[in-house]
């Protein structure tokens, strides 16, 4: 598989959409199963989060001091993070790679869903590094918004205009930087674990992904917006659309963008069978 950018500027968004639709229509069943796997991976953390929320509500109803609430989350927050790192992250990468490989012609390779567990260290390392970089990039905007919010709260009923401006500017800065960085990095965990390309380390995968997405952040942002629309439409269809339409299209769009920015060539068509050169053509067995 080629992973070099073409010297001529690619139509990344056009190829993303083309690959995504082709994958969605040719491997729909596989993508549905991959989406169900992604939903199943979120159940343990979701259930534990609900349990902690119920405990917190009961403690508040009984007049527990805030310090006990803090202790509760100090105990359970690492468990929730561990579940995400050890279960949800590998499945998320495996699901993405399932769509990537389906777009390359492997439309029945259900085992790829577990690829993140086969490369567990790379999967967790890439996702952790991406989360850290995302938080670092959004931090300046969040600090500005927090300063403005502090001013709004302390002002009571008549906040100063500068405080409101700080909240708006800080929030916009954090959102815009996060969108841009996500568009540049969302292919990074997939490249770190892609079984069809030469194996590389986490930091080399980051370098390759950063280089591949240079100049294509807008295409990545549009891809994320379309993915969000697909998820929202799925929720709107009594959630069954999330399984049949939302998740499969979101996964396919992610795979399309990954292959488009890396200029990953489509697999060659199999050669036609050699012509029969004998005197008697082959016969069907009696």
Image: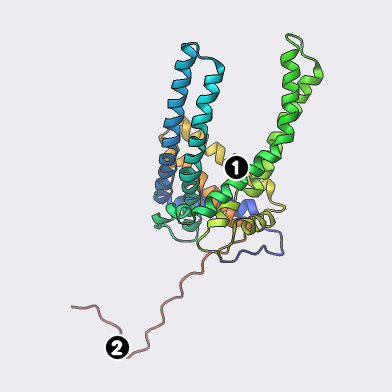
**Measuring 52% from the left and 36% from the top, which residue is drawn there?**
78
Counting residues from the N terminus, which is met first, the one under dot 2 or under dot 1? 1
x and y, in percent, of residue 44 in the image:
41, 36
Give the side of residue 17 with respect to residue 177, left or right: left
Q: Which residue is mark 1?
A: 224
- Is residue 63 shown to the viewer in this render? yes
User: How many marks overall?
Assistant: 2
State the residue lying farthest toward the bottom.
279
Q: For the residues marked 2 and 1, what is the alpha-carbon distance in whole angstroms?
A: 59 Å
Give the side of residue 80 with respect to residue 285, left or right: right
Name the residue nearer the viewer: 119 or 162.
119
Which numbered disc covers residue 280?
Answer: 2
- Is residue 26 shown to the viewer in this render? no
Answer above or below: position of 268 versus 203: below
Name the residue nearer the viewer: 17 or 98.
98
Say whether marks 2 and 1 touch (CB < 8 Å). no
**Measuring 57% from the left and 64% from the top, which residue is drawn there?**
265
Answer above or below: position of 272 versus 65: below
**Measuring 56% from the left and 37% from the top, which residue is drawn there?**
228
x and y, in percent, of residue 205 in the image:
62, 57
Answer above or below: position of 148 versus 173: above
Closer mark to the observer between disc 2 and disc 1: 1
Which quadrant holds residue 171?
Answer: top right
Name the residue nearer the viewer: 271 or 246.
246
């Amino acid at each position: 598989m080629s992973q070099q950018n073409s010297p001529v500027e690619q139509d990344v968004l056009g190829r993303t959409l083309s690959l995504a639709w082709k994958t969605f229509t040719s491997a729909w069943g596989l993508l549905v199963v991959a989406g169900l796997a992604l939903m199943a991976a979120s159940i343990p953390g979701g259930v534990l989060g609900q349990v902690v929320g119920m405990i917190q509500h009961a403690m508040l109803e009984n007049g527990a001091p805030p310090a006990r609430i803090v202790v509760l989350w100090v105990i359970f927050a690492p468990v929730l993070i561990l579940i995400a790192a050890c279960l949800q992250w590998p499945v998320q990468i495996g699901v993405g790679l399932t769509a990537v490989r389906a777009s390359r012609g492997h439309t029945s390779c259900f085992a790829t869903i577990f690829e993140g567990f086969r490369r567990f260290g790379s999967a967790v390392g890439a996702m952790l590094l991406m989360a850290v970089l995302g938080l670092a990039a959004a931090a300046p905007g969040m600090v500005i918004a927090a300063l403005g919010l502090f001013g709004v709260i302390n002002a009571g009923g008549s906040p100063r205009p500068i405080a409101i401006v700080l909240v708006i500017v800080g929030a916009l800065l954090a959102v815009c930087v996060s969108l841009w960085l996500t568009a540049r990095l969302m292919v990074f965990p997939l490249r770190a674990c892609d079984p069809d390309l030469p194996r590389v380390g986490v930091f080399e995968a980051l370098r390759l992904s950063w280089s591949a997405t240079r100049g294509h952040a807008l295409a990545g942002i549009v891809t994320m917006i379309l993915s969000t629309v697909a998820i929202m439409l799925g929720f709107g269809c009594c959630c069954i659309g999330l399984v049949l339409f939302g998740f499969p299209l979101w996964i396919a769009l992610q795979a399309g963008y990954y292959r488009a920015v890396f200029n990953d060539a489509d697999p060659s068509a199999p050669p036609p069978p050699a012509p029969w050169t004998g005197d008697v053509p082959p016969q069907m067995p009696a």
